[in-house]
Image (cartoon, rainbow, N blue to C red):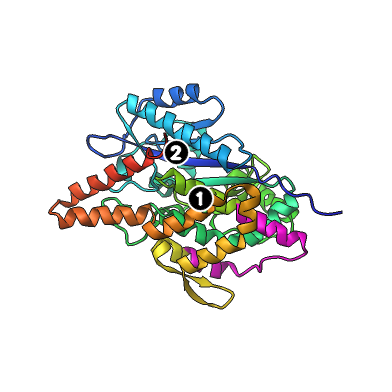
């Protein structure tokens, strides 16, 4: 009897920053009515607080395909941006704010966040970052674990397409995704461990729960994990993208890669599982250079331009993109490669402003204005 094909449903979560359009700084204490009004207008989706009050998190309903995910994400961004504007604030989909200072921010008064703040202290207080998560429906837990083991290889490739956090507290960080440097200061992050079965994963979670280290599996913050709430494999590696088309591209590519790995499994084949250290090295290269850099092709081994590796991936998932109806979204990878990621555009805007005689502060304001504009573009 053959393997039953997973549903490959998907859900997208994004975290946004609320910005004062006059000062371009983060809104330190935005009114609670923003969240309540968003929840009232979006009953079919999730709109929740994040650790910092200046953040807001959204989650689409379960979507059967990329077209449904597009409609859901556009609706969410449109409504949340509209409500924020009604309250005199702007919505920013970027993984760091160019110059905000985490020392001045306040965390949300919620039991979960109070516990996290108590447990992690200064490490979590500087968590002024936003990410994008993609859930893919894989009901069978054993298949979920097997595909997680193999999918880890491709996480740095997805990260390189998403980078949107080149600044930190008013300085050019030199990294295209500084967000990960902040997030990695938390425990239980990074590339996931390899497991021989779902039971082995459950035993690890149970040991940590029984030892009092975590309350449940939701406190394991790997770049890729079996969701503790849903029968999904949750990709957490990527920065949040200002342009909604980039978000949809990454979600589609992630889903197609999982379907490609499932096809291998159906033929009793598999993607080679490489040492975590080598995959982590690619993670660093993607974090540092984005699409303009190189990643290690672990099959050679040797470093290859990201653009070449992406073309190989497009070829690998061609059948899957057709089957899942997301060929247009997958081919958008080439657009990202051609014009760069948000990090590239932010740096370009910043350097251009400086060359034109702007002060550092003015140049940083230019970056904020760019990201605010891109966050709501293409929503009509």
Q: CA distance from mark 2 to mark 1?
A: 27 Å
Residue in view at x 51 percent, y 46 percent: 248
Magenta residues (range): 256-283
| Res. 9 image quadrant | top right
Question: Horizontal placement of 267 versus 290: left or right?
Answer: right
Question: Horizontal placement of 308 versus 85: left or right?
Answer: right
Q: Which disc is residue 302 wearing?
A: none
Residue indicated by mark 1: 249
Look at the image and tell me in which quarter the C terminus lies. Answer: top left
> Which element carries disc 2, helix, strand or loop?
loop
Near mark 1 (Cα within 10 A), the count class, few <14, some 14-19 or many ≥20, is many
State which mark lies toward you, 2 or 1.
1
Say whether residue 15 is magenta.
Answer: no
Residue 96 in the image, given as x and y percentages of width and height: 36, 48
Query: Which residue occupies the foreground of this view, 337 or 98?
Result: 337
Residue in view at x 51 percent, y 26 percent: 42
Question: Horizontal placement of 287 versus 21: left or right?
Answer: right
Residue in view at x 61 percent, y 63 percent: 316
Residue 140 in the image, given as x and y percentages of width and height: 75, 48
Q: Which comes sooner in the sequence, label 2 or label 1?
A: 2
> Which element carries disc 1, helix, strand or loop?
helix
Residue 34 in the image, given as x and y percentages of width and height: 40, 25
Magenta stretch, main secondary structure, is helix
Residue 186 in the image, given as x and y percentages of width and height: 48, 52
Query: Which residue occupies the foreground of this view, 362 or 310?
Result: 310
Look at the image and tell me in which quarter the N terminus lies. Answer: bottom right
Q: Is residue 25 visible?
A: yes
Residue indicated by mark 2: 51
């Amino acid at each position: 009897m053959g393997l039953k094909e997973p549903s490959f449903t998907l859900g997208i979560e994004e975290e946004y920053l609320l910005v004062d359009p006059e000062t371009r700084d983060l809104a330190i204490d935005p009114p609670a009515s923003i969240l309540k009004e968003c929840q009232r207008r979006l009953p079919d989706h999730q709109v929740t607080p994040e650790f910092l009050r200046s953040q807001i998190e959204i989650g689409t309903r379960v979507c059967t395909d990329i077209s449904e995910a597009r409609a859901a994400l556009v609706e969410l961004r449109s409504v949340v941006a509209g409500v924020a504007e009604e309250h005199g604030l702007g919505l920013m989909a970027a993984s760091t704010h160019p110059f905000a200072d985490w020392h001045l921010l306040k965390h949300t008064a919620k039991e979960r966040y109070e516990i996290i703040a108590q447990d992690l202290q200064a490490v979590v207080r500087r968590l002024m970052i936003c990410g994008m998560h993609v859930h893919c429906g894989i009901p069978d837990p054993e298949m979920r674990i097997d595909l997680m083991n193999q999918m880890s290889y491709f996480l740095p490739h997805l990260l390189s397409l998403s980078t949107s956090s080149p600044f930190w507290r008013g300085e050019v960080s030199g990294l295209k995704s500084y967000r990960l440097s902040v997030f990695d200061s938390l425990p239980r992050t990074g590339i996931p461990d390899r497991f021989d079965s779902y039971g082995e994963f459950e035993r690890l979670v149970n040991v940590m729960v029984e030892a009092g280290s975590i309350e449940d599996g939701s406190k394991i913050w790997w770049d890729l994990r079996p969701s503790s709430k849903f029968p999904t494999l949750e990709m957490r590696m990527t920065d949040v993208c200002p342009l909604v088309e980039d978000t949809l591209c990454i979600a589609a590519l992630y889903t197609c890669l999982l379907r490609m790995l499932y096809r291998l499994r159906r033929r009793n084949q598999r993607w080679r599982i490489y040492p975590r250290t080598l995959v982590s090295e690619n993670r660093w290269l993607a974090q540092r250079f984005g699409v303009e850099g190189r990643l290690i092709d672990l099959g050679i081994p040797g470093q290859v331009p990201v653009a070449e590796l992406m073309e190989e991936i497009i070829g690998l998932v061609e059948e899957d993109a057709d089957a899942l109806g997301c060929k247009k979204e997958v081919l958008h990878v080439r657009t990202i490669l051609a014009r760069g990621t948000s990090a590239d555009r932010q740096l370009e805007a910043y350097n251009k402003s400086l060359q034109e005689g702007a002060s550092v502060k003015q140049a940083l304001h230019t970056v904020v204005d760019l990201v605010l504009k891109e966050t709501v573009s293409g929503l009509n």
